[in-house]
Image: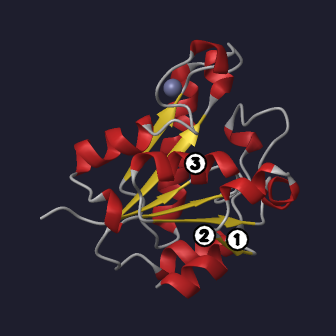
């Protein structure tokens, strides 16, 4: 039977957003509230999956292996704090590549659903960008919501936010998870 999943954007949801991209582990600052919230969720039976755009790879700013190593270390740090990430799906492409996986395209979510046998309609997406919500809708994810951390507050003030609405908004990942689970 397919699992439900909690899809999480990485930058701005679990770790701080960086204006010049997360290029090395030194750029990674995990939100303490996110770390604690993920540890509380560790026994949830669904899959917990990070879906992240990392165009710094496609722009030639970060090597693919380095980007993957950052994801691996993040997963380890979350595990050491008592949490769990089942998989990370990353789009390494630049916008000019016109790939099918850079959010707002649904490719990462669709790939995850196939690889992990996930029922997208029974799943949840949490992001800090309208493109996260748009990707989730395009993939058929049942519930998508935004957090105000990272780019969230600025994104919510954009005129296009009215067109993408309605979606629930929470201050942080911790608050969103406390409401959902
Ligand atoms: Zn891509």
Cα gap from disc 1 to disc 2, whole angstroms: 5 Å
Residue occupied by mark 1: 32
The structure residue drawn at horizontal position 67% and vertical position 63%, both measured from the top left corner, is 165
Q: Is residue 83 visible?
A: yes
Q: Pick the residue in front: 84 or 13.
A: 13
Does residue 110 appear to the left or right of 22 in the view shown? left
Cα gap from disc 1 to disc 3, whole angstroms: 27 Å
In the displayed structure, would residue 58 be above or below residue 20? Answer: above
Q: How many marks?
A: 3
Q: Pick the residue in front: 39 or 45.
A: 45
Cα gap from disc 2 to disc 3, whole angstroms: 25 Å
As helix, strand or loop, the secondary structure at mark 3 comes to: helix
The structure residue drawn at horizontal position 50% and vertical position 21%, both measured from the top left corner, is 99
Residue 134 numbered mark, or none? 3
In the displayed structure, would residue 120 be above or below residue 174? Answer: above
Marks 2/3 in contact by CB < 8 Å: the verdict is: no
Does residue 24 appear to the left or right of 104 in the view shown? right
- Residue 32 position, x and y percent, is 70, 71
Residue occupied by mark 2: 35
Q: Earlier in the sequence, mark 1 or mark 3?
A: 1
Marks 1/2 in contact by CB < 8 Å: the verdict is: yes
- Residue 65 position, x and y percent, is 51, 23
């Amino acid at each position: 039977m397919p699992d439900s999943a909690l899809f999480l954007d990485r930058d701005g949801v679990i770790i701080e957003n960086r204006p010049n991209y997360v290029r090395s582990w030194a750029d990674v600052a995990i939100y303490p509230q996110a770390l604690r919230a993920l540890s509380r969720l560790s026994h949830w039976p669904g899959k917990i999956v990070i879906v992240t755009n990392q165009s710094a790879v496609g722009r030639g700013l970060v090597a693919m292996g380095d980007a993957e190593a950052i994801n691996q270390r993040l997963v380890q740090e979350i595990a050491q704090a008592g949490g769990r990430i089942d998989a990370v799906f990353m789009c390494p492409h630049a916008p000019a590549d016109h790939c099918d996986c850079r959010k707002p395209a649904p490719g990462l979510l669709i790939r995850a659903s196939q690889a992990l046998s996930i029922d997208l309609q029974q799943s949840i997406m949490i992001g800090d960008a309208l493109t996260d919500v748009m990707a989730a809708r395009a993939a058929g994810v049942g519930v998508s919501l935004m957090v105000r951390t990272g780019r969230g507050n600025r994104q919510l003030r954009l005129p296009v936010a009215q067109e993408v609405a309605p979606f629930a908004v929470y201050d942080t990942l911790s608050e969103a998870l406390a409401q959902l689970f």
